[in-house]
Image (cartoon, coloured by chain):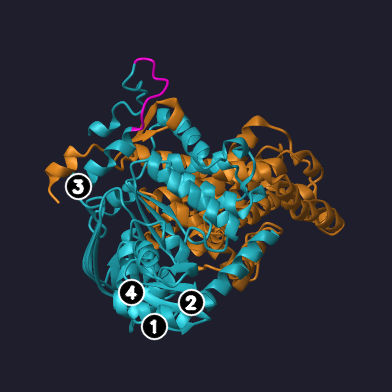
Chain colours: A orange, B cyan
Amino acid sequence: MSMATQTAQPGAITAQDGGLASQIRVAVPERSVRSDLRAVSIVWRREMIRFRRDRLRAVTSLVQPLLFLLVLGTGLSSLAGGSMPPGVNFRTFIFPGVLAMSVLFTAVFSAASIVWDREFGFLREMLVAPVSRSAIVIGKTLGGATIATVQGVIMLALAGLAGVPYNAELFLILIGELLLLSFTITAFGVMMAARITQFQAFMALTQMLVMPLFFLSGALYPLSGLPGWLSVLTRIDPLTYVVGPMRHAVFSHLSLSPAALAHLSPGITWVGWVVPIWLSLTIVAVMGLAMLTIAIVEFSKTE
Amino acid sequence: MDQQEASVATQAGPGTDGADAPAPAQAGAGVQLETRPPAVEVSGLTKSYGDIEAVRGIDFEVAAGETFGFLGPNGAGKSTTIKILCTLARPTAGRASVAGHDVVRERDAVRRNIGLVFQDTTLDNYLSGTQNLRFHAELYAVPSAAVEPRMKQVLDMVGLWDRRDSLVSTYSGGMQRRLEIARGLLHAPHVLFLDEPTVGLDPQTRSSIWEYINDLKTREDITIFLTTHYMDEAEHCDRIAIIDHGKIVAIDTPEALKASVGKDRVQIQTADDAAAIRELASVFGIEAAMHEGAVTFSVESGEEFVPQLFARLTVPIRSVSVSRPSLDDVFMSYTGTTIRDAEASGTDHMRQMAARFRGRR
């Protein structure tokens, strides 16, 4: 067909509302950055609406981290207490790890909503829209990251239980680090969801990966003085590079002696070289972006 | 791009009072049908999945404003064709364009101009009706000012305005389908694709869905492309293509298709059947025989023949029945199977299982 006939036919369709004698003209504009941003925003907003509706989930997600913090943390404190400086509780030590844990599980579960959406058809509604797949994947990832961060912040509000001071600067740092972790883990989940189309398989596989991620991150023990094999594994675990900086933030706001700080938060070392905090966080961010990119590529290939 | 300009225009009708303005779409439809380019153009379309040829070189056109039905048993290639037209699958060979845009090269342009209602629900049950529509409006970048009025319009059209703020999970199957139709129309597409729009619904809900679709044809300037394997639904179409084993075996209006199959069947009960048969042969040259206890014969057009029958037959007639060939007969004659065989197939069973699973949550 020629362009002439195309332009002669207006882009707007006219619709009549029988009795009202009014016409509502709707024209879907060409795809643009603005329309893609609108798509990112609405995909994000949908995640928020669903999270708000699902209060039970917010509550149940707290149970596991609280068990680790209050039961494991208290139960082990008599054993671990000896190596703690005076006035520092074992619960304080594992608090950053527990924060990371609540974010970890929530983020993976948020990403699972893609698999859920696929199973119940809604993913199709998104994939057939005249928007770029990246808009949908980014919206989903940011949505999941926001929910996971909110979940982390709820946990953070319970800092007093772990003897962590309510300090504005500390909280800002921790929230920023939680956001970064949430983003990366959600991106990981979304990347997995691009390939794994069955809910059960997705949950089984992610749970299988999430527990080792948590246990190898140094969330429950210091990274110094580990046997070689465990030392290597902890350095491979991306979660390590968030838990380390979070622990550093917590302990540097506790007015400890430099010796005690060095003992409790020795930093992450690569064959003796201490990885600076900015590099730790950059590693996590780069991994998140890389997985997001893979997810976008994967979703652009389907249908 | 001038499409960005004035997205909402409220115009009074031709009369200044605006109280009882005519519906221009209805009046103008006939004229536009002639002048506008086809809504769907397909030529030599082929789609193979591995060794299996789902669609084997089909050609057809759908005029703008037409309601076009794709009829065939499950696995005949209906859904594959609709997937290609909706840019969800790439053709192996041949070409197709929708609303003037090539489905492969101008994918986004096609997507902007079509509305889709799938066989299986694609609603978010955890959102309200309004929220589902809002999501769609944002995703299709419907100009912000137009979103609210257009949402009201489509919700009114499908009779869901009162239930707009309820969660979709509380909707009945028929309401969900209506909401999907409303959503498919929200961005004012040129072509609305309905893939088995009434599958899995009870007969009453099916007919109410059809009331909404028929109403839609009069309200919106739109081309409707649907697939169905319900014979009675095909009657709602302006034209039907019968597809079987990936090929179009017949394409025409329902009336013409029925006429092509055979003549109307007339059965009469008379005072003297033997005399009636003799007279039919001598007066009309029609060969009649006794079937099911009645004098039975076939003629081209039953209704037109019956008055002549009364005028010219001397044997008193007690009762007359005229039956026309149904689309079932049409389908049977073109494909050699009945459509009911297809209805009991495995894919339907799967869908019911999925629906049951969905309902449980």
Query: Which of marks 4 and 2 precedes in the sequence?
Result: 4
Q: Nearer the viewer, residue A46 or A76?
A: A46
Tell if the residue under mark 4 belongs to the same chain as the one under mark 1.
yes
Q: Chain of mark 3?
A: B
| Cα distance between the residues tagged 2 and 3 | 37 Å
Q: Specify the quadrant of the image occupied by residue B248.
A: bottom left
Q: Which mark is residue B342?
A: 2
Q: Is residue A252 toward the left or the right of residue B289 in the image? A: right
Q: Chain of mark 1?
A: B
Quarter of the figure with the C terminus of chain A: bottom left
Query: Which of marks 3 and 4 precedes in the sequence?
Result: 3
Which SS class for mark 1? loop
Q: Residue at x 22, y 52 (%)?
A: B38
User: Residue B294, relative to residue B91: is it above or below?
Assistant: below
Amino acid identity at mark 1: Gly
Q: Chain of mark 4?
A: B
Q: Are marks 3 and 1 in contact (CB under 8 Å)?
A: no
Which SS class for mark 2? helix
Q: Is residue B18 magenta?
A: yes
Q: Which mark is residue B336?
A: 1
| Cα distance between the residues tagged 3 and 1 | 35 Å
Q: Which mark is residue B305?
A: none
User: Residue A90, relative to residue A174: is it above or below?
Assistant: below
Q: Residue at x 34, y 72 (%)?
A: B299
Residue that badge 3 annotates: B34
Label 3 neighbour load within 10 Å: few <14, some 14-19, many 20+:
few
Query: Which of marks 1 and 3 precedes in the sequence?
Result: 3
